[in-house]
Amino acid sequence: MSINSSEINLVQATFDEVRPNALATAEIFYKRLFTLDPSLRPLFKGDMVHQSRMLMAMLGAAVNGLTNLEALVPVVRQLGARHVNYGVQDAHYATVGSALLWTLGEGLGEKFTPAVRDAWTAAYSLLSSVMLLGAIEARSLKEAVNTP
């Protein structure tokens, strides 16, 4: 998975468009996520406003970090490892990606052009692949520790 500089610029510029409405955007995202897969709702046990703030902060950090993948990749990898403890399964990443793209389309309207969609798809593919790698490593480590 890779992302080029013009895609990074599109992702960053369009995230700046939705950032002022961060909590509303996160609310729309979670509503869509739970519509796509209601079985995900129990994974979110805490305050959803707090969860929404964390989501948007993490997404913002990832979007900003796309210009420095060398620094971003280890952080995203660790994030994937932590998500194993929350009960996130590999298949959930596709659902999250669908919910994210749909939410961006809703938030950006006509500005969600095919080029913007492709850029966000590239960014999410890259980030989710790294998170999945972290998740696989965390599960392997757990299995190794629990094997007599």
Image (cartoon, helix red, strand yellow):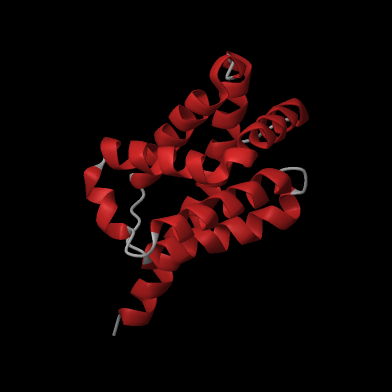
In this image, 114 relative to 5: left or right? left
- Relative to 148, say whether 39 is above or below: above
Q: Give the position of the C terminus as an image quadrant.
A: bottom left
Question: Can the viewer see residue 53 in this picture?
Answer: yes
Q: Nearer the viewer, residue 9 or 24?
A: 24
- Relative to 121, say whether 46 is above or below: below
**Image location of residue 102, percent across then percent down:** 44, 28
Q: Nearer the viewer, residue 27 or 137?
A: 27
Residue lying at 52% horizontally and 30% vertically, measured from the top left: 104
**Image location of residue 13, percent across then percent down:** 72, 31
Specify the farthest residue to the left: 39
Residue lying at 56% horizontally and 49% vertically, measured from the top left: 56
In this image, 46 relative to 4: left or right? left
Q: How many marks?
A: 0
- Relative to 23, say whether 75 is above or below: below
In this image, 115 relative to 23: left or right? right
Residue lying at 70% horizontally and 35% vertically, measured from the top left: 12
**Image location of residue 87, percent across then percent down:** 32, 61
Question: Can the viewer see residue 137 in this picture?
Answer: no
Q: Quadrant of residue 58?
A: bottom right
Residue lying at 66% horizontally and 52% vertically, measured from the top left: 61
**Image location of residue 127, percent across then percent down:** 57, 45
In this image, 7 relative to 85: left or right? right
Q: Give the position of the N terminus as an image quadrant.
A: top right
